Amino acid sequence: MAKQKDFTTLVGDGGETHQQIPKKDTHDADGHLTTDQGIRIADNQNSLRSGARGPTLLEDFVLREKIFHFDHERIPERIVHARGSAAHGYFETYESLADLTRAHLLQKPKQKTPVFVRFSTVAGGAGSVDTPRDVRGFAVKFYTQEGNWDLVGNNIPVFFIQDAIKFPDLIHAVKMESDRAFPQAGSAHDTFWDFASLMPESTHMLMWAMSDRTLPRSLRMMQGFGIHTFQFINAEGNTSFVKFHWRPLLGVQSTLWDEAIKLQAADNDFHRRDLWEAIDRNDYPSWELGIQVFDQKFADRLPYDVLDPTKLIPEELLPLRPVGKLVLDRNPDNFFAETEQVAYCPANIVPGIDFSNDPLLQGRLFSYLDTQKSRLGTANFHQLPINAPKCPVMNFQRDGQMQMSVPKGRANYEPNSLADHGEAGGPRECPVTGFATVRGRDAGGEQGDKLRVRAELFADHYSQARLFWRSLTENEQAHVASSFVLELSKVKLEQIPARMIANLRNVDESLAKRVATGLGVELPKKSKAAREPVDLEPSAALSIQQSFQPTLAGRSVGLLFTEGSDGALIRSTAKAVKDAGGQPVLIAPKVHGVMLNDGSSLDADGQLAGTPSQTVDAVAVIVSEEGCRALLKDAAAVQFVMDAFGHLKAIGTSEAAQPLLDKAGVVPDEGITSLDKAFIAAAGRRYWAREPSVRQLA
Ligand code: HDE
């Protein structure tokens, strides 16, 4: 405490002062509009002119300042993960992890730490859409009492490459092609598949990328992974390896590709809106943090290297220990100030946690700090309110652009003896509580000659890709095969699909054949694996469908109705959806004043043509006979039902709706129900068995 006070009087302050910067208001205390210099503005409608029809005067500082500021509103977007959405919340521990780590945030049960979490797509620009096939970022900033810890992960537990030196190549290849500037936000093009097919180490991640994992139903329904192996160190100095997993309490759920493509057309901001609206209605998204903890002996027994970020440790082999809960309960006040300016960095780590020698992680430790300087324009970006630690910041870093704190006194170096002469001497290092790096050899780290080589087991590029494939349901496998076909169909250079299929033969012969058949090309010769793959035990935890929990919690149900619809049925269905934790969404051909059969009038949440069924999880068609006749002539209505059926959703229906169902080609199955309890029970699921009847899969 004493030290903290010293510092505040001596050098101003890092953390606290930044927190105190008032939120920018556009008006002064009495509600008056001012310039950035605080001068009250008399007229915000007209610029200063010489005569009513005369030229505008250079003298108009109000106009000039306003336009000047506007001209500089944009900052460079992130080179990757540019498109994102974020929220505030907290992390609460279940129990003490003092046996494993001395990290302050993990010491006591029910300990709460504020967080800011940003989700993102990888390839697209900041203005791109939310639902392309893409990996999602899952970045968590914990504002702990011992400084910020950033766990900057993805929704997939492995990565494309093993070494940071390949990252610029990977990203150049996946982003829009550099001459034509398309495609935006998509991997289905020559340069990505050219690179990927030449990098067998990417095969495991490609399997995930082509699976339903890259089409999340909601940011609230994704897993998150720290990917790399990290280390814990406890107060006694004992170390262990650790991997971090986030499990959504709403369960993992994805969309179908056809659905995702149509969602893109229906709502560019589908995920951003979904996250915002859920928090806005106090339906707070939450995740459980699970850890996989192991030691060197365990690592030595594995047929893959735990420092290789293209590998995972199956949960069946090393179960997750649940350690706490993440809850997002507050939307940002300002998108730019918070979501855009937040600067995550895997190098932000707290005492008790440490990195491993994973060569991808090691490269990231440099990249993020560097990128923030070019994005935010100053080495003082850590002083922005969203980035500032919520604990004191005390050091002798000084000056730089946009310096916000006002250090007092002469102590801007250390050691100094100023305190001996009655001046404040500033903060000092603390070997006891300060961050201590795990000594390499304690944790099986290696030292040796300086070499540009990879460890031996990194050369196994296919065993885990095969493990993933064999862990999926037949339906999920068909999605993977079909995605390869669809993506590779967009590749124009002939040699690329052949090279990719040659690699896939090392994963699974039937997969390779299905992709070749789907593309209409001959099966190429199998590529030579750098290391022969081995068969690993399948892991059901890797399959979304096998761990799917049917529920309406956090999901929405579209109620399509018309003039003359059964008012009581609409109301009871909406209530039943709500009671089951879901969100009813009323959809009608017009939004205001729809007259129902009981004489009441009802407003809709969405107009039919602008609210297609892909925006909801199940549909109830509650139409009158006359209303149904009108809908038969409305392509949006027919498509609404056809897509709900094609996207394997439950459809609850009354008799009057039958002609519409017939026209949409709906064939009865267990997902097509009457509008009673059966519908509510059916609505929280997807009907995978229906898929072969509506879609040709590879
Ligand atoms: Fe990143 N990554 N990355 N990355 N990454 C960035 O940092 C980088 C990697 C991830 O919401 C950038 O602030 C390198 C793996 C997320 O703001 C940049 C390498 C994983 C986000 C950068 C990787 C990630 C980023 C761009 C290979 C999953 C968004 C802007 C060595 C564990 C964070 C920025 C947010 C962002 C570099 C690999 C996740 C350029 C060099 C592996 C979620 O610094």
Image (cartoon, helix red, strand yellow):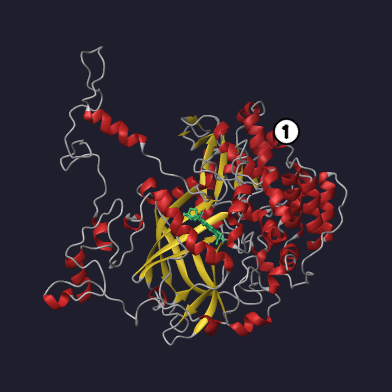
Comparing 182 with 479, the one in front is 182
Dot 1, how many residues are within 10 Å of its Cα: few (below 14), some (14-19), or many (20+)? Answer: few
Percent position of residue 112, x then y? 37, 69
Percent position of residue 283, x then y? 45, 55
Q: Residue furthest bottom?
A: 236
Q: Which of the 4 image quarters holds residue 529? A: bottom right
Q: Which residue is mark 1?
A: 663
Q: Is residue 537 above or below residue 605?
A: below
- Asked if ligand 1 lies within 8 A of label 1, the reply is no
Q: Residue at x 57, y 59 (%)?
A: 155
Percent position of residue 162, x then y? 63, 64
Q: How many marks?
A: 1
Q: Residue at x 27, y 54 (%)?
A: 403
Q: Residue at x 40, y 40 (%)?
A: 74
Asked if residue 451 shows in the view, the reply is yes
Comparing 280 with 150, the one in front is 150
Q: Is residue 191 above or below residue 139?
A: above
Q: Left or right of 380: which side holds 167?
A: right
Q: Secondary structure at mark 1?
A: helix
Comparing 287 with 228, the one in front is 228
Percent position of residue 409, x then y? 16, 65
Q: Residue at x 39, y 78 (%)?
A: 108
Q: Which of the 4 image quarters holds residue 252? A: bottom right
Asked if residue 683 shows in the view, the reply is no
Q: Residue furthest left?
A: 422
Residue type pointed to by label 1: Lys
Q: Is residue 600 above or below residue 55?
A: below
Q: Quadrant of the N terminus?
A: bottom left
Q: Which of the 4 image quarters holds residue 619? A: top right
